[in-house]
Image (cartoon, rainbow, N blue to C red):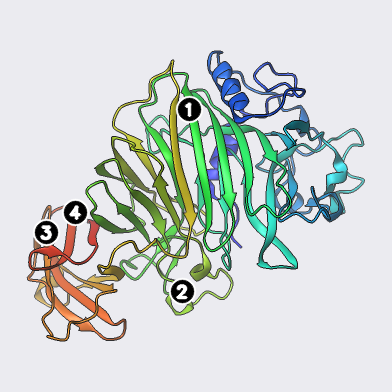
């Protein structure tokens, strides 16, 4: 298992000024009041009306200097699992502060409308070899929590979702292992002044009813630029679905804001291995960005690991869905016995209402190691979110193996590229081969045509062939950059001048 994601590390290390709201804070719902989500919204609104205040770190004494190996020695005690033995479909374990997770958060249980704050109590944890080395007065704080349930076997409670670090959370569907992450909010990704990482400072977890197939989590978000009230309705299964309601209260205009942000890792694939020396065929948690835009166009953009930061915008009006997808689902596409990349989840975001004009933004960050998350995708509204008012976004986040196939057309199965040998080699010309599945060769033998466009350079006449290995088609074409530093490539299969495939997009860069 690879270590914690680099963006999560940056979030925790770079935002120590954000932490849990003490129980006595005026911005917290009073303990005696019956809990409703409106109380969280009012708390966020009240917090936004005040100057941002850096939280205290009093809970860190004794654990602030723990390294990674020491932190891993602290484990949740099975006997202190919340709701254990109560016959519910869910149980919960709190996670400790320490190592990179130096920001304590407040965690509350909501039972019958009543709020019960969880007090810091070392009996939640088995500190292992650290026992006796921590000062006796140390009370280990909470960095987050995990929800478990009998998702894969009726007699085993597996992890379903975990909230830990900034506004990050990860979830699984049946048969999957952890890969990409989601976040509550992204601010200033890829900006020269540096990214801002909001934090979930306080949580309220509703105790589920007996036999309930879902669980509800509420969270209060805070940062120097905005606050927010979040509600997560989590329904585990195949796939797991999380219905998210987010109400944001900006402290200042939010120009570079990311709604429904996703974070993943892409090191290499068969498209470009020019600087890779690895026994594996591919290494990634996601291999493409999929978009179903407001004009009902299906887009597929293979991911890349560039030498310099690349930012792409896909302009849209009321997007229908987007997500980071792991389409390569076979061991033979990776040959990694430990990482099992073929079992990593995809993530699919479906807005619950019209989001208006804006763009799906994709950030591809250079990376030399698979321990680092280097891919970010989110929705950016066309207009900044103004302070002094509430901005509400709702969406469903699903964790399928692949993006939902909502139409009968062909989808991109794989993309391959390589240098053309011969006289064209000096010019840097490439040969692209794009395989499509889901569209069998018609009985007449008449194949669709490939329409290829480029923003720079020259593409050769495309060739479409049957690919019996995938019961689909292959479209191949040459590309000569003609000295260009970059080019946007676009390919779609057409029959009778109508698209019968996803639109394949690719950004080629010289280096």
Disc 2 crowd, CA 10 A, few/some/many (<14, 14-19, 20+): many
Nearer the observer, 336 or 367: 336
Secondary structure state at the residue bearing disc 4: strand
The crowding category of the residue bearing disc 4, from other C-alpha atoms within 10 Å (few below 14, some 14 to 19, many at least 20), is some
Residue 210 appears in the picture as rendered: yes
Tag in front: 1 or 4: 1
When the figure is inspected, residue 196 is found, relative to residue 374, above or below; the finding is above
The x and y percentages for residue 55 are 66, 23
Q: Which residue is mark 2?
A: 334
The reply to whether the C-beta atoms of the residues labelled 1 and 3 are less than 8 Å apart is no
* Direction from residue 344 to residue 116 in the image, left or right: right
Name the residue rendered at 68%, 25% in the picture: 21
Q: Is residue 499 above or below residue 103?
A: below
Of the numbered discs 3 and 4, the one sitting upstream in the chain is 3
Q: Which residue is mark 4?
A: 488
Please tell me which residue is depicted at 83% across the width and 45% down the height of the picture.
124
If you read the primary sequence from the N terminus, does the residue marked by circle 4 or circle 2 appear first?
Answer: 2
Observer-side mark, 3 or 2, equals: 3
Viewer-closest of 332 and 307: 332
Nearest to N terminus: mark 3 or mark 2? 2
Question: Which residue occupies the extreme top position in the image?
Answer: 50
Examine the rendered structure and indicate whether residue 355 appears above or below residue 339.
Answer: above
Are the residues at dot 3 and dot 2 in contact (C-beta closer than 8 Å)?
A: no
- For label 1, the residue is 248
SS at badge 3:
strand
Q: Identify the mark at residue 453; answer none if there is no mark.
A: 3
């Amino acid at each position: 298992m690879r270590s914690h994601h680099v963006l999560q590390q940056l979030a925790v290390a770079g935002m120590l000024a954000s932490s849990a709201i003490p129980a006595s804070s005026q911005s917290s719902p009073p303990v005696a009041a019956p809990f409703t989500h409106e109380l969280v919204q009012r708390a966020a609104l009240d917090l936004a009306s005040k100057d941002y205040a850096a939280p205290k770190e009093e809970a860190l004494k004794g654990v602030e200097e723990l390294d990674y190996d020491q932190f891993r020695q602290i484990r949740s005690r099975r006997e202190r699992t919340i709701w254990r033995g109560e016959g519910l479909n869910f149980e919960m374990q709190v996670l400790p502060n320490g190592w990179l997770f130096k920001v304590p958060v407040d965690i509350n249980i909501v039972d019958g409308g009543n709020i019960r704050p969880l007090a810091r109590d070392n009996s939640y944890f088995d500190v292992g070899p650290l026992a006796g080395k921590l000062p006796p007065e140390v009370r280990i704080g909470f960095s987050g929590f995990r929800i478990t349930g009998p998702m894969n076997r009726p007699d085993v409670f597996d992890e379903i979702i975990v909230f830990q670090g900034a506004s990050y959370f990860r979830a699984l569907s049946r048969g999957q292992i952890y890969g990409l992450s989601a976040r509550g909010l992204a601010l200033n990704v890829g900006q020269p002044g540096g990214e801002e990482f909001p934090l979930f400072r306080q949580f309220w977890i509703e105790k589920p009813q007996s036999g309930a197939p879902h669980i509800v989590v509420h969270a209060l978000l805070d940062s120097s630029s905005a606050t927010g009230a979040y509600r997560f309705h989590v329904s585990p299964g195949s796939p797991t679905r999380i219905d998210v309601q987010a109400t944001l209260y900006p402290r200042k205009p939010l120009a570079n804001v990311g709604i429904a942000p996703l974070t993943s890792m892409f090191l290499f694939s068969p498209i470009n291995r020019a600087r890779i020396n690895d026994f594996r065929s591919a290494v990634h948690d996601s291999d493409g960005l999929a978009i179903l835009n407001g004009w009902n166009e299906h887009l597929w953009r293979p991911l890349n690991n560039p030498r310099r930061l690349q930012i792409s915008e896909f302009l849209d009006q009321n997007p229908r869905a987007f997500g980071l997808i792991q389409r390569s689902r076979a061991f033979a596409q990776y040959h990694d016995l430990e990482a099992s990349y073929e079992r990593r989840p995809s993530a699919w975001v479906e807005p619950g209402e019209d989001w208006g004009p804006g763009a799906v933004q994709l950030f591809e960050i250079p990376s030399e190691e698979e321990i680092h998350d280097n891919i970010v995708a989110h929705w950016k509204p066309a207009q900044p979110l103004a302070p002094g008012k509430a901005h509400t976004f709702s969406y469903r986040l699903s964790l399928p193996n692949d993006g939902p196939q909502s139409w009968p057309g062909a989808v991109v199965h794989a993309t391959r590229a390589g240098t053309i040998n011969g006289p064209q080699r000096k010019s840097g010309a490439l040969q692209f081969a794009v395989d499509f599945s889901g569209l069998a060769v018609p009985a007449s033998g008449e194949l669709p045509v490939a329409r290829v466009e480029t923003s720079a350079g020259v593409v050769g006449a495309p060739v479409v062939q049957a690919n019996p290995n995938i019961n689909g088609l292959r479209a191949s074409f040459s590309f000569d950059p003609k000295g260009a530093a970059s080019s946007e490539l676009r390919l779609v299969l057409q029959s009778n001048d109508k698209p019968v495939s996803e639109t394949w997009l690719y950004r080629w860069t010289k280096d």
